[in-house]
Amino acid sequence: MKLSVLMAAILLTATGAQAADTLAKIAAANKITMAYRESSVPFSYLDGPSKPIGFSVDLSNAIAAEVKKKLNKPNLEVSWMAVTSQNRIPLLQNGTVDVECGSTTNNSARGKDVSFAINHFYTGTRLLVKTNSGIKNYADLKGKKVAITTGTTNMLVVRKYNEDKKLDIDIVSAKDHADALLLVESDRASAFAMDDILLYGLRSNSKSPASLEVVGDALQVEPYACMLPKDDPQFKALVDGVIVGLMKSGEFEKLYNKWFLGPIPPKGLPVGLPLSDELRENIKTPSDKPAT
């Protein structure tokens, strides 16, 4: 560990802050561990057996590059670890991963356990259904099975809506997004309720994109952001600086166009989702404001 990094860690810990912990930990290990998701298209997903790609993966790479520069460690190892909706927060809390950039909603409840960087996307819960299902909105789900990925905010949103509207929806918990998609494709669920952008991405990479469609009103609008260790303002400032820098330079919008409007692996089909008004405003005035 560099003496300057060690002294900063000791000084900041002594004053009651833990601002240098993450950088000191990374420096000591000579390794930064980035979390990724296996099927959060186009944010973070696998292209082949072990190669994570996507919009959030590109953000992760930019963060790793800045950490190398900050620590003056050009040969710093960048390690990748797959996480799920269920284990992503515990693995960040216990230090197994240093950064999680996937498709994670920045909300107040999670903010008690982790920190969030500048928001980089806005989305709402909608429905992926078969085009011949006759389902156009939530009212059409009365008494039907709906797949939702375990450990997501969508589960809470749909459960509340189900209770309020007395739709008698049978919610089926899925291990991950790919499993939830399979439940719909195999007619074991009538719909998959999830963030609309993830549904568009899954549809574009599915076996038969034309047989699926995204329908329904958005139940809520929520921001996505990279998750960071709690109470580490120095590390958060570094990550925020990377994301704001990309936004101000125009590189962020280029990355967005690459992953959301251009053809993407593995099928070379576009997701086809232009920048939202909320995201355009966030690029102009960057914010880490959480959903309630």
Image (cartoon, rainbow, N blue to C red):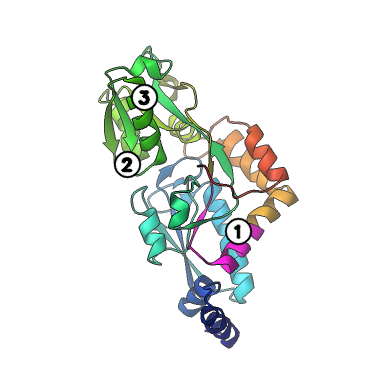
- Sooner in the amino-acid sequence: mark 1 or mark 3: 1
Name the secondary structure under disc 1: helix
Write down the residue under mark 2. Answer: 150
Q: Which residues are magenta?
A: 224-241
Residue type for callout 1: Ala
* Residue 18 to residue 7: above or below: above
In the rendered image, residue 274, in percent from the top left (x then y), is placed at 63, 31
Left or right: 136, with 257 as reference point: left
For the point 37% across and 50% down, the residue is: 49
- The foreground one among 22 and 220 is 220
At label 3, the amino acid type is Asp
At label 1, counting other C-alpha atoms closer than 10 Å, the crowd grade (few under 14, some 14-19, many 20 or more) is some
**Residue 164: mark:** 3
Where is residue 26? Give x, y as percent: 49, 73
Which three-letter amino acid code belongs to the residue tagged 2? Thr
Quick check: 168 left or right of 32? left
- Residue matched to label 1: 62
